[in-house]
Amino acid sequence: MASWLDPQSPEAQAIVRLFASYLVIAVTIFLIVSSLIAYSLIRYRARAGTQQPRQVTGSRPLEFTWTAIPLLIVASLFVLTVRTMAFVDAPQDLTANPGLLVTGHQWWWEARYPNGATAVNEIHIPTGTRLLARIDAADVIHDFWVPQLARKIDAVPGRPSFLWLDADAPGTYQGTCAEFCGMQHAGMRFQVIAEPPAVFSAWVEAQAQTPPEPTGGPSAAGARIFRDQKCGECHAVSAADRAPRNGPPLTHIAGRNRLAGDLANTPENIGRWILTPQAVKPGNRMPAQHLSNTDAAAVTAYLESLR
Ligand SMILES: [Cu+2]
């Protein structure tokens, strides 16, 4: 997991700058206070024959000073924080038109784009663009967190929130769910893939198309088995199909890097997943499918054609 101390967007950089200011202020106060204590311990320690020092009570100047100093410190922390929040936080405006709809599911992330494209666990964004993302959840509370790009934000079912997603340079940024959400909470990994705007536009266009239905060979047989086995009750395989389902859309599964969050997207892993999803990601919401090995191989060939 990449560190939030290596920020790659203006928003994440602002958060690290705020952290650094807090750290500098806190360390300075700590050094001043501890050196005063150390000095007093040594300079004024009890020696044989010392007298009770002069007692001071109700001193106006002293009372004023040690009220004013903390007040100043807290006020400056307040100003720094409010300024950072104003820059980092997206407006929480339910009538806004987000560039991206993110929904947390047990245990995968769905992303939908305004043109109908969908993505699963791999969220593409254009670089150098502040993209407004609407963060929602389908079941329980999740938390969307890409440490290098943005603040954390809770994904609360029925109460969407908004986030700026932004990246300075092309790259793959790791994300995770940051709110305990059940057995596979830790398996809810995702990636934000930042691309130059032209590459991103081409990708989002392609994702809005439905791959052609295979016409022959094992992948055509796999498509039939996919229908007969009712995989389609949980999985969309067409870009036009936007009905809510329990499972992630598989429309462009072959074009993805990863499977089920944290698994390399290889034919072997797809086959293993179809036959024994519970062994691969225990507790996940896909029941075992009881396919023969040949049927699973055919379905794998079909899914490999969905690019
Ligand atoms: Cu979660």
Image (tube, rainbow, N blue to C red):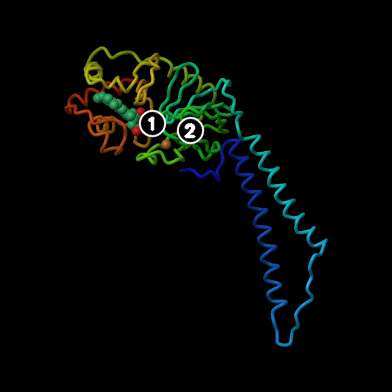
The residue to which callout 1 is attached is 257
Q: In the image, is 185 to the left or to the right of 147?
A: left
Q: In the image, is 190 to the left or to the right of 293?
A: right
Which residue appears at 77% of the width and 54% of the height?
68
Give, as a three-letter code, the residue at label 2: Ala
The residue to which callout 2 is attached is 155
Element at label 1: loop
Q: Could you tell which of marks 1 and 2 lies nearer the N-terminus?
A: 2
Quarter of the picture for ligand 1? top left
Q: Where does the image place residue 139, in percent across and percent down from the top left? A: 40, 30
Residue 25 drawn above or below residue 135: below
Position of the C terminus by quadrant: top left
Foreground label between 1 and 2: 2
Q: In the image, is 17 to the left or to the right of 44?
A: left
Which residue appears at 38% of the width and 15% of the height?
241
Give, as a three-letter code, the residue at label 1: Asn
Which residue is more in the foreground, 64 or 268? 64
Which residue appears at 19% of the width and 27% of the height?
291
Q: Where does the image place residue 138, in percent across and percent down from the top left? A: 42, 28
Q: Where does the image place residue 103, in percent across and percent down from the top left? A: 45, 28
Position of the N terminus by quadrant: top left
